[in-house]
Amino acid sequence: MPIEQNLTGYPSIDKPWMKHYSNEDKNWSVKKCKIHEYIYEKNREYLDDTALIYMEKKYTYKKLFENIDRVANAFYSMGICEGDKVAVCSVTTPEIIYSIYGLNKLGVTVNLLEPRNNAERIRDYLLMSECEYMVMLDICYPKIKSIVQDTKLKKIIVVSPIDSASYVYKAGYQIIGKKNKIPFGSMYESWKQFLKRTVPFENGPSAPYDGNRPAVIVYTGGTTGVPKGAMLSDDAINHISEFARVSTCIGEERQEDFLGIMPPFIAYGLCCGIHGPLSVGNRLIVIPNFKPENFKKLVLKYKPNHFVGVPSFFEELANYSKKVDLSFIKCAIAGGDKMSVEVENKVNEFFKNANCTKKIQKGYGMTEMSSSVVITTDFCNKLGSVGIPCIGNTAKIVDCETGEELTYGQQGELCISAPTIMLGYLDNPEETNKVIEVDKDGNKWVHTGDIAYIDEDGCIFIIDRMKRMIIRPDGHNVFPSQIENVIMSCNAVEKVAVVGMIDDKGSSGKWPVAYVVLKNEYNDSEKLIRKEIIDLMNKKLPERDKAEEIFFIDDLPLTPIGKVDYRKLEEMCGCV
């Protein structure tokens, strides 16, 4: 479809991606309300529909809202009210979903903490947010016990993964010895005891909507690597669910199954993996203890119509050697990390051979923008692209040194303007101002720290992270993804990651080195494959853009949510 206007050459002015949206989409709007009110308004006429599926038990939307109200009343009975902050340190369980929305109903900011963080990091986050109350997964007790005296915590509500489970699951949980011996009393309170605090309120306590009040705080390394608390508003989170409705088929029909594997303590998990599916009437299959190696097993067991994950999950799925039927998949989205062209082709071929009529969709976003703000669609899904800006968003590429906007096809830093931009970092205006720029017209732009370009169709292609860029001792800049793409073109290679290794002669700068995982059938051919990789680099890359060393390893280390752990690789080669 031709663009209906003469291009100026600048994406932020031309907005070529708008040709991919219908007139109805262009007239979109999102009601200004709390996230609790948003899911209620979207489902109040369908209360008998299933909202949650947890350990084989089903909970209707009616039961979901009753439990949210009950939990809100219990928090209110403890003296928690509008403007307070309450920490939630847990994986996803029904209780955590009730807590997030129940606290939101009260106008309380939910401080989301990752239970896998070490005790010191959790303590720092609790002090940073000045939380006096906490909802905690029971297995976190040893960590919290070690630091609780250094915090302002007055009361800790303890949640177990089996609180909403059937008797069979509860028995199994106790048999395998996971139940912690927690001294319930003045400081620690079980979920069951907590709910006894509930007293009847007419219509229940509820705070008014406030667009400037953080709904949640999510922690991120941001673009500088220093952990900070990103404050996300109700409006921002609600807009994310609207993006999903407009750009994907997730909201086309109610009561389709959504596999909830992303944790609640990351923006991607909360906004796209919990709030999004509940906003469109999906049946959310809640998986509390997700492990990346179980991804294909869960997909084949539950046969979900929709799910989101990181690229490594889909790569593992595509490695499945048995013949499977994936015709049930309507929308599968990979985000949170860059998916290589080779992996994208591999996944799409696997889907096709498994009777799935869809291609993998890719998304792009940041915690600072409440997760996904760019996405591929059924009608615009170019190979290698992360998609077009979601409706209402604007993108541009700027020169990394001058900040001037670049034209189509030129590489520079990707900047995004969107209604989902965070309110700011908690008590850190200096770092906030480094990430968010306000232009002369008052528009807010997030500097993503990613090198990218935009084509004339409005499709965005990510080249690499600015902070992943390797500066060689001779001053030449190398983008690891360019080396990774060449090495991945070798048929014997399963995975690859490139990091910088410190020069052993003491010079400043680093040399690019590649960590390569071979396919099983090539594990005894390292010498031959090394030569093939070197030949490929010699053929396809400039002399200074090649990996200086190639290391073969059994597998790439991953972070808890499935991203490649580049820091671990850097430690392996003595960089940090």
Image (tube, grey):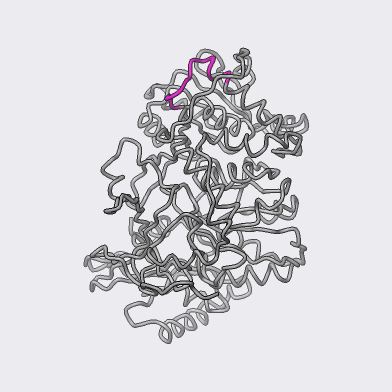
The C terminus, quarter of image: bottom left
Is residue 450 one of those drawn in magenta?
no
Residue plotted at (51% across, 31% down): 88
Image quadrant of residue 573?
A: bottom left
Give the percent coordinates (x, y) of residue 87. 47, 29
Residue plotted at (64% across, 41% down): 278
User: In the displayed structure, does residue 357 sit left or right of residue 139?
Assistant: right
Is residue 74 one of those drawn in magenta?
yes
User: In the displayed structure, does residue 236 sit left or right of residue 261?
Assistant: left
Give the percent coordinates (x, y) of residue 110. 48, 32
Q: Which residues are magenta?
A: 73-85
User: In the displayed structure, does residue 495 sit left or right of residue 406?
Assistant: right
Residue plotted at (51% across, 46% down): 239
Of residues 500 and 75, the one nearer the viewer is 75
- Residue 438 visible in the current orientation: yes
- Residue 557 visible in the current orientation: no
